[in-house]
Amino acid sequence: MTLNGRGAGVVFNWLHGTCKAHRYCISGDTQSSEIYGTKGMKTVVTGGAGFIGSNLVELLLDEGHAVLILDDLSTGKKENVSTFLEGRDCSLKQGSVTDLRLLKEIFQDVECVFHQAAIPSVQRSVENPRATHEVNVNGTLNVLLAARDCGVEQVIYASSSSVYGDTPTLPKHEEMLPTPKSPYAVSKLTGEYYCRVFAEVYGLQAVSLRYFNVYGPRQDPYSEYAAVIPRFITRILAHHPPVIYGDGTQTRDFTFVKDVARANLLAAERNAEGVCNIACGVRISINELAASIMELIGVELEVRYDEPRPGDIKDSLADIARAREALGFQPEFALTEGLAETIRWFQRPG
Ligand SMILES: NC(=O)c1ccc[n+]([C@@H]2O[C@H](COP(=O)([O-])OP(=O)(O)OC[C@H]3O[C@@H](n4cnc5c(N)ncnc54)[C@H](O)[C@@H]3O)[C@@H](O)[C@H]2O)c1
C-alpha cells in the first residue's frame, strides 16, 4: 500500500472554499484563515494525557487547532495536560475507547482523530494479552466505527515498529512482511489492518504511523514497564547504575517525541493514507545509549546487566524514505539534542 500525499487536496479545498480550508494548508500559511475565518481543525486526541499524546496536543494547540482529549488516565496523567486546559481551546474527557457510545458522542463535528490511546507495553501484553486486545484492538475498531458513523474525515493511528518483529533485514521498510513477536505487536498490526479496511470499504481516510522507540519529556520513568531512556536518565541523575536487559548490544532507532508529534500533523495536512515509518533513521546500541546519557549528565557509573525480557527484539532501524516523500517528514532532533532536552526536563525544579 502506498502513501498518498495529496497536494491536490489543497487546491480542491481552496477552490471550493469549504470551512475546512485551513487544514489543507501547510502550517504557517495564514491566508486560509483570513479568507475563511476558520481557526483550525476540530480534533480529538485519544490517549492525549499520555506521553506522546500530550506532546501532540501541545503542538496542535500551538498550531491553532481545537483539541478534545479522550483518556481513561490509566497510564496518562491529568498533570501532563493541565496547563493546556486553561485558556486554550482544549478539554479533557475521562473515558475509554472501549466505550463506543461515548466515542460517537464526542466525535460529532470532529474533522480529525489522532488515535494514540493504547496499552503500550510489550511486557504487559505478554502478561495479559486479553487486556491488550480489548483496548488496542477493540478500542481501535470502536474509534474507526465511531469515526465512520460521525463523518470524521481522517483517523491518524499510532502504530508501532514492533509489527516488524525480529527479522534480520535492516532497515525496516513498509513493504516488508510483518512478523509480530508479542501480543502487543499483534494488536498494533491488527489496528493497521482495520485502518486499511475502513479506508477501502467505507472510504474513511486512515493512516498508520509506525513509531520507532519514542522518547522525550513527560515519558514515565517509574512504572515497571517504563521505557529505557527515562529509566536510564532518572537512575543516572540519582547516581544509580543503569540496568540493561540482555548484553546491551541490541540496537534501537530512538525518535524524539516532538518529531513524532510533527509527523502526525504532517499526516493530517497531507491527507496521508496507508502505512508509514516515523523514526530518526539512525540506530544506537543500548550500551552506547547508557554511555551517551552518562556523558551528557557528567556521571560515570558501572552498568548492571540483567536477563533479557521476553518479546524484546534484537535490532531496530527504520527506512524513513516514505515519510520523507509522502509527508515531507525530516527528523529535526539528533539523538544527543533530544537526550539533552529530555535530561533538562527531568532536571526541572519541582
Ligand atoms: N512510546 C513509544 O516508544 C511508542 C512506540 C510505538 C508506538 N507507540 C504508541 O503510541 C501511543 C502512545 O503511547 P505512549 O508511549 O504515549 O504511552 P502512554 O501510556 O503514555 O499513553 C497511552 C495513553 O492512552 C491512555 N489509555 C490507555 N487505555 C485507554 C483507554 N482504554 N481509553 C482511553 N485512553 C486510554 C493512557 O491513559 C495514556 O494516556 C500508543 O498507541 C503506543 O502503542 C508508542
Image (tube, rainbow, N blue to C red):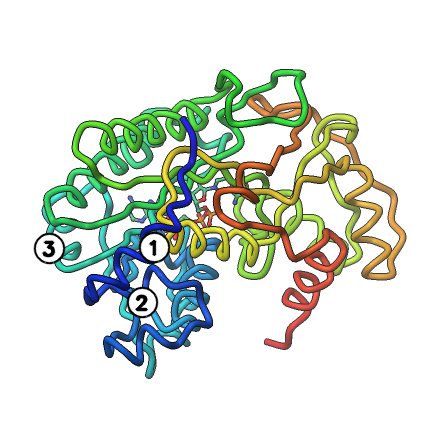
Up the image or down, 114 lies above or below 164; here it is below
Q: Is residue 80 among the parts visible in the rendering?
A: no
The residue under label 1 is which amino acid type?
Leu
Label 1 Cα crowd, 10 Å radius (few <14 / some 14-19 / many 20+): some
Kindly report the distance in space between the C-alpha atoms of the residues bearing marks 1 and 3: 19 Å
Q: Nearer the viewer, residue 337 or 270?
A: 270
Q: Amino acid at mark 2?
A: His
Dot 3 crowding, Cα within 10 Å, few <14, some 14–19, many 20+: few
Give the label, 1 or 3, closer to the camera: 3
Q: Nearer the viewer, mark 2 or mark 3?
A: 2
Q: Secondary structure at mark 3?
A: helix
Q: Quarter-wise, where is residue 238 in the image? A: bottom right
Going from N to C along the chain, the mark reached first, 2 or 3, is 2
What is the spatial separation of the Cα atoms under label 2 and label 3, in whole angstroms?
24 Å
Q: Position of residue 210 (x, y in %)?
A: 49, 37
Q: Which residue is mark 3?
A: 105
Residue 286 x/y as whole percent:
75, 37
* Residue ID for mark 2: 22
Q: Secondary structure at mark 2?
A: helix
Question: In this view of the protein, which residue sits in the foreground, 2 or 320?
Answer: 2
**Looking at the image, is 119 positioned above or below residue 79?**
above
Amino acid type shown at disc 3: Glu
Residue 61 in view here: yes
The residue identified by callout 1 is 73
Please report the residue visible at 44 percent of the width from the left and 59 percent of the height from the top.
Answer: 56
Residue 55: image location, x then y, percent: 48, 61
Q: Does the beta carbon of the residue at mark 2 sit less than 8 Å from ligand 1? A: no
* Residue 170 horizontal side relative to residue 53, left or right: right
